[in-house]
């Protein structure tokens, strides 16, 4: 097996593998012709590093047969600058994981993911993230559940009706969409793993939203400050604002007043044609406080927001925000990236950078890389350690609660 990054003019091979695995349509000859007609200048441009990291914004790792002729499987890796405890770090978003049926269960994906992790670590990436078809499958590579996400379906009759003021503006093709980016970055400014965006969604200016029957509504306060928006499409009699792979709609509001304004507009304007509104939000948003009749919440489903993995234990420890002052020794096991395996001493103090080093001393706690990933991101907390069979605590008095505590964590980008 030969594992390597595909050249830009080889990506048609990956699209073939992915089309087979995901049962999608593909004009293979057209894709091949387009790829093989790329000029050397176009290939060189596609391989240039992106502005926020050492690699191109997207790469594809492939596993070839021993003779190099057959692409058996592949994994896409996207580079993202993300927030983590008030700092900017790099995250590798994994997608397009696929293997041709005759080559499954032969270590193809393990080979691709291991190579991708190795390059991420060498390139200074702190985390990786993906949306799993099977959580148990990806736990073997060190991933663990991301933060909770709630999908709400609320009957219009349950929403408050008073108008909080401000104004609603509908955005059409060609309009300035920068207010959406402003709201997004304000909404997620303290949220771990959220991608730092220069544009809310580039596809909005490229797609024909009107032909898709999707609509954008922006709420501004009395000072014309953008405070909330939603992008929706009618699904039966439900105003669907959810962010999903088939269609990336959205609902973001910066405070209770913005939620009330958007809900008031939706109900008073569309109640004749819609019965309910559906939206998905990070689990830390207490949306039920804004619903006057709780029985009108006909659905509130809890999901895990993808899966996260720490690529570099020392980088995550150096940049994590701890409470107060103290030190703790954490033993981590990582069979995929052995550089992470071992005991790490973390010393922290208010106003000073964290100090991280390997230690030969007995650890206070022992964790697999999956559990460490969820804890260091604030998805799981020290209080949950008794319910984590994969964690072994040797010194219960160690200040775990100053390192492993609840923090907002959510990834809105899909890849």
Image (spheres, helix red, strand yellow):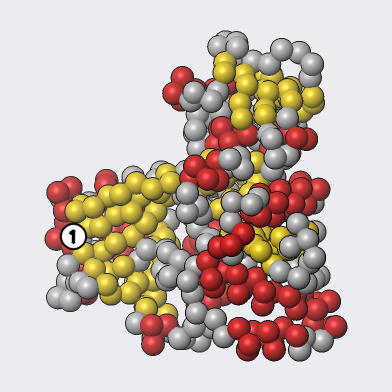
Is residue 127 placed above or below 75 in the rendered structure? above
Q: Quadrant of the C terminus?
A: bottom right
Q: Is residue 120 visible?
A: no
Residue at image point 34% right, 46% down: 302
For disc 1, the neighbor class at 10 Å (few under 14, some 14 to 19, many from 20) is: many
Q: Quadrant of residue 210?
A: bottom left
Is residue 182 placed above or below 170 in the rendered structure? above
Considering depth in this image, is 354 or 361 the residue closer to the camera? 361
Residue 234 at x, y percent in the picture = 28, 74
Q: Is residue 4 left or right of residue 105?
A: right
In this figure, which residue is indicated by the disc labeled 1?
155
Is residue 407 placed above or below 186 in the rendered structure? above
Q: Is residue 103 left or right of residue 150?
A: right
Residue 359 at x, y percent in the picture = 79, 19
Residue 368 at x, y percent in the picture = 61, 30
Considering depth in this image, is 291 or 103 the residue closer to the camera? 103
Q: Quadrant of the N terminus?
A: bottom right
Q: Is residue 99 left or right of residue 343?
A: left
Q: Is residue 148 left or right of residue 298?
A: right
Residue at image point 19% right, 53% down: 298
Residue at image point 68% right, 34% down: 334
Considering depth in this image, is 349 or 140 the residue closer to the camera? 140
Considering depth in this image, is 107 or 96 the residue closer to the camera? 107
Q: Is residue 244 visible?
A: yes
The mark tally for this picture is: 1
Q: Disc 1 on helix, strand or loop?
A: strand
Residue at image point 55% right, 36% down: 374
Residue 242 at x, y percent in the picture = 37, 63
């Amino acid at each position: 097996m030969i594992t390597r990054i595909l050249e830009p003019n080889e990506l048609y091979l990956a699209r073939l593998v992915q089309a087979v695995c995901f049962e999608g349509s593909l004009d293979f000859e057209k894709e091949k012709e387009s790829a093989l007609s790329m000029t050397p200048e176009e290939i060189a441009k596609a391989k240039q590093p992106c502005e926020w990291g050492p690699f191109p914004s997207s790469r594809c790792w492939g596993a070839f047969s021993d003779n190099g002729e057959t692409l058996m499987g592949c994994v896409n890796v996207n580079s993202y600058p993300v927030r983590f405890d008030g700092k900017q770090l790099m995250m590798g978003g994994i997608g397009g994981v696929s293997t041709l049926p005759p080559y499954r269960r032969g270590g193809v994906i393990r080979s691709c993911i291991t190579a991708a992790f190795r390059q991420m670590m060498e390139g200074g990436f702190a985390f990786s993230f993906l949306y799993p078809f099977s959580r148990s499958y990806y736990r073997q590579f060190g991933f663990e559940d991301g933060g909770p996400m709630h999908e709400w379906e609320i009957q219009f009759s349950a929403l408050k009706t008073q108008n909080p003021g401000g104004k609603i503006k509908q955005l059409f093709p060609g309009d300035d969409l920068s207010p959406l980016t402003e709201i997004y970055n304000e909404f997620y400014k303290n949220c771990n793993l959220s991608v730092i965006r220069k544009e809310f969604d580039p596809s909005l200016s490229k797609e024909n939203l009107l032909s898709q029957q999707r609509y954008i509504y922006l709420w501004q306060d009395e000072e014309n400050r953008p405070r909330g928006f939603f992008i929706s499409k009618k699904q039966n009699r439900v105003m669907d604002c959810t962010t999903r792979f088939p269609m990336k709609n959205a609902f973001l509001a910066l405070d209770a007043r913005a939620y009330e304004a958007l809900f008031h507009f939706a109900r008073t304007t569309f109640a004749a044609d819609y019965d309910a509104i559906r939206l998905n939000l990070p689990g830390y948003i207490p949306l039920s406080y804004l619903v006057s009749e709780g029985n009108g919440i006909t659905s509130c489903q809890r999901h895990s927001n993808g899966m996260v993995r720490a690529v570099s234990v020392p980088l995550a420890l150096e940049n994590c925000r701890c409470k107060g002052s103290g030190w703790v020794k954490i033993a981590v096991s990582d069979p995929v990236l052995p550089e992470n395996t071992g005991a790490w001493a973390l010393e922290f103090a208010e106003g000073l950078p964290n100090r991280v080093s390997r230690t030969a001393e007995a650890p206070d706690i022992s964790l697999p890389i999956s559990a460490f990933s969820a804890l260091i991101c604030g998805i799981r907390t020290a209080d949950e350690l008794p319910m984590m069979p994969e964690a072994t605590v040797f010194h219960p008095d160690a200040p775990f609660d100053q390192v492993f505590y609840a923090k907002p964590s959510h990834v809105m980008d899909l890849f």
